[in-house]
Amino acid sequence: AAFWNPAGLASLDTSEIAIHRANTFVSDNTVLAGYLASRNLGTVGVAAYLVDYGSQEDVPGGGRAPAGSVSPRNIELLASYATDLFGGLAVGLNYKLIQFRQDCSGDCTPFRTVVGTTHGIDLGVQYGFGETEALTIGAALLHAGFKLQVQNRGQADPLPTRVQVGAVYRVRLPTSGDAGAPLDARLLVDIQERWGATNDPDARVGLELAYGQLIRIRSGYAFLRAESAGPSLGLGLRFGHLALDFARVFFEQSSLENPVYLTVRAIL
């Protein structure tokens, strides 16, 4: 929720800490996050996000041994707050400290250590309809902020600001009278577009089947105008105060390595 629509953090009824790990074709991503949920004050939390692109060795001419290595990384620190206002309306806000850095070790003659830092925000809103809030709609403004400057102002890059809207519909499935836990299904739809653009939206749909809090089976499909379009599968398990979530994306028409996602959450 913190990275997709921060208003979703308002739905947390317990505090938690979590470790998220994603291995993609371009980077290894790690998130350490913690959130405190209060019925009266809302949800507050922080997250540290590392995107590691690996290291590249600097090998001088003549086939000699590597003289040094360059390690580019993105680092993001988030501070989040979300709360329910009234009548099913929830709002959420992220403040983000964003840094790109390229560190060099060894002989850095052809390279140099560079650091660029900027600031951004995410703003989200969600509204649930009816007493059970079976239908929830949401909207979010993501990655809005100042340009990222590494060398000079003319070279500064704008943040990838996005606008997205989405909805989720929950259905309680019929069960026999002696069923140990309720069965329910959720249908999710989301559309995302670059800020200021109207002709190239990305769309995603998903389906989740849940047996109480014990197990959740997930599937989805990303309709993207990119090689990363395609289906995905996921599984969530919860044992007491420990929750595990696993997902994998299967690119439909691409030679890129399929990403794998893993989350471990401790419910406090």
Image (tube, helix red, strand yellow):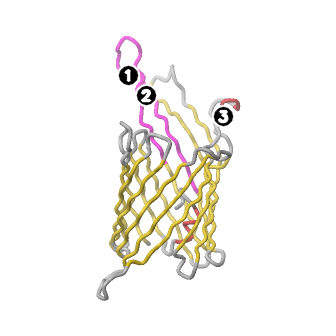
Pointer 2 and pointer 1: residues touching (CB < 8 Å)? yes
The residue located at (67%, 47%) in the rendering is: 145
Q: Position of residue 11 (x, y in %)?
A: 53, 72
Residue 41, compared with residue 204, is above or below; it is below
Given the image, on which type of amino acid does mark 2 rest? Ser
Residue extending farthest bottom: 177
Q: Is residue 246 left or right of residue 139?
A: left
**Crowd class of label 3 (few under 14; some 14 to 19; many from 20; radius 10 Å):** some
Q: Quadrant of the C terminus?
A: bottom left
Q: Position of residue 20 (x, y in %)?
A: 42, 55
| Residue under numbered circle 2 | 69
Whether the magenta-drawn stretch holds residue 65 is answered as yes
Q: Residue at x 34, y 14 (%)?
A: 63
Mark 2 against mark 3, which lies toward the viewer? 3
Q: From which residue to which does the magenta span run?
A: 50-78
Q: Amino acid at mark 1?
A: Pro
State the residue position of label 1.
66
CA distance separating discs 2 and 1? 8 Å
Q: Label 2, label 3: how many angstroms apart (C-alpha)? A: 25 Å
Q: Residues within 10 Å of mark 2 (few under 14, many from 20)?
A: some
Measured along the vertical axis of the image, is residue 53 above or below residue 195? Answer: above
Q: Nearer the viewer, mark 3 or mark 1?
A: 3
Which image quarter: residue 218? Answer: bottom left
